[in-house]
Every structure is written in structure tokens, then in C-alpha cells.
Amino acid sequence: MQEISKSLTRNWKSFPDAVCTCTYMHQGTSIFQISPLRKGFGITIGNALRRVLMSSIWGSAMICLRIEGLEHEFSQIHGMREDTVDFIHNLRQLSFIVKDGGTHKCSLKISRGGDVTARDVSTPDDVVIVNQDAHLCTLAPTFNGVLEVDFVIKGGYGYSTSDENRALHPDLFQDTPIYCDSSFSPVRNCFFEIEEEILHDTLKITLETNLSIAADIALGVAARILQHNFAPIINFEESKSEESVSKTTATQTFDKKLFTLVSNLQLSVRSHNCLSHANIKYIGDLVIRREADLLKMTNFGKKSLSEIKGVLRHLGLDLCMTISGWPPENVDAIAKSASSDNNIDLSIL
């Protein structure tokens, strides 16, 4: 592989160092802000990420089912308020976490009246239903039969029609199988907008998942997929001296505030102890954490969360930030060096 001249490296080294920050998170919806980006790159990166997120993230979905006593999906289930098509639609809305990503059989067996939810579904050990409270159907109070359903879930990408599922998996059930369309993608929706500044772009991505994957993980996976596919196109390498300079520069691009000891912040004893027990030593360790992760810590409540967010806000930081390369290998040495000329005014906290 050929080496290139130093003058050509300015084509990418002159780009501003962008930071990805999660600015909103509620249930399955998150908003990410990526800035600063060179003019025009907001739409370039936004389009690429959206296409990958909507089409290429692995997920699991139901592909086929069998309902005892029914020949096809247009037959009515005696004692069920919903028709069979609606019942199957509700089953298709279940979100699965499948640890091995393979094909598994789940079952539902009900012999009582009342509401039937995802909690009534029996799954193998490797399968978890995320939306446990999802409504499946309502059986009449006088229901005295047995609703017995078996269905198969498998992993995949994108969307598969019932005909495709039937062709690929013809022998899942011996009697009266009902094949359905399958939406494998864990990403329900994704859109972006560009804020055009004078010198740079800010990309805002709104991402909704079915909770089988965290939104920030889905975004990271999409970026990794793009990185993997672009890698074979790079047909040159930087000289060793250039690589050395690049690594040094990368270390120096970290905001000095990230190397501030959490113990130097004016936090309550409770908040400080919680962070200490979680091995959160530097501000950089703190800002990459999600609110949900912090709230899982023992003795850490919403009051502590509000206190920490207020402190970070004064420093121009926030939780759920994506900081590439954090922590650096020599984080303690860098922190010691940064502390000697760190001009952060902690008195405002």
C-alpha cells in the first residue's frame, strides 16, 4: 500500500473535531446532535446514517404461526373480541431481544377469559420480550376453551414478505401454518435536520427504536457499518511519522475539562460517593454515561441526577455525550499534565 504526502492529509485533518451528544431521551426515542461539521457534510452524513439505520440493523421478528383449530387467518377465533387478523397484527408488534440472534419457537396457551398480554407468552431462555405489557387480545369472560398458539421468530434485516418467509422456511409447522410479513429492523423511525451556521453545520438526528436496542447503540452500529464498508476503498497509508503526529494530535484534542477529577466538583457527599463507587473518576467518565445508567446506581436518585446535570451545564457539558477515544490509554498522565495549566473556574459550581 502506497504512502501519501503530508499535503494530502489536510483533506481530512482540516475538518473540525465533531462531538456527538444525546440531547433528549425518552423511552425509545432519542435526539442526537453532531457538531461542528464542515459545511455541506450535515446532509451527507445524515443521509448515510439514516439509510443504514432504516435498512441494515439486525433485529428479530415473527415469521410464521399456528393457531390450534384454525385453517387460515380469516377464520374467527371463538370467544375472542378481536378478529384473527388483528390478533396476528398484535403479535407482530412484539419486540424481541434474542441473545444468539437465531430462530426460536414461542408459545401462548390461555384457558381463561380476560385480557391477554405479552406476559402470557412462553419464550426460550435466549429470548426476551421487551414490551411485556403489549395487548394481544381480549377473551370473553365466558370463554371456556383453550387458545393455543405457536409462533416462530428469527433474526434478519429490513423487511420480508409472507411469501418470502414461506419460500425460505416451508416446513416450520406440519399443519395449517400461517405466514406473515416480518419487519426485522429495530429502528421504527429516523429523520434528521440540518442547522446551517456561518462556518459549520449542526446535524440533529431523531431516532426511535422498539427498545430491543438502545438508540445510541443503534446509531453507533450504523456508523460502524459505514466505516467497515468504506475501509476497502482507502488505498494508501500515512507515513509512520504522520501516524505518530496524528496520535499525539488526537490526544491533545480532548477538552481539558474532561480530565478534571470528579472529586474536585462541589457535589453533595451522596453524589460523590455514588460516583466513586461506580469508578467514575474524571468528568470524561461521567459525561459518557446515560441518565438511566446513573439512576441504576445504589442510593443515586433524581435529586443527585439534577445536581450533576446542573454542574455539567455550567461547564458547557451534558450527560450521554459520545467522545471518540475516551478514555485515552494514558488518561492519568494526561490528567496530571492538564491539571497544571487547567484554567477551569470551579467556583461557579
Image (cartoon, helix red, strand yellow):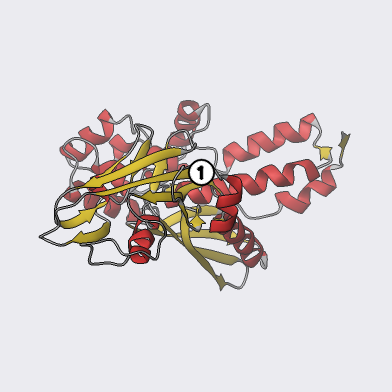
Say which residue appears at 64% left-offset and 39% top-offset: 249
Say which residue appears at 26% left-offset and 59% top-offset: 135
Q: Position of residue 227 (x, y in %)?
A: 66, 45
Q: Which residue is mark 1?
A: 155
Left or right for 284, reference 236: left
Say which residue appears at 40% left-offset and 59% top-offset: 30
Q: Is residue 233 visible?
A: yes
Q: Residue furthest left?
A: 142
Q: Position of residue 15 (x, y in %)?
A: 68, 55
The image quarter containing residue 314 is bottom left
Q: Which amino acid type corresponds to the residue marked 1 in the rendered image?
A: Gly
* Helix, strand or loop at mark 1: strand
Of residues 209 and 136, the one drawn nearer to the viewer in this rendering: 136
Left or right for 171, reference 278: right
Relative to 61, say whether 271 is above or below. above
The image quarter containing residue 51 is bottom right
The image quarter containing residue 276 is top left
Left or right for 288, reference 277: right
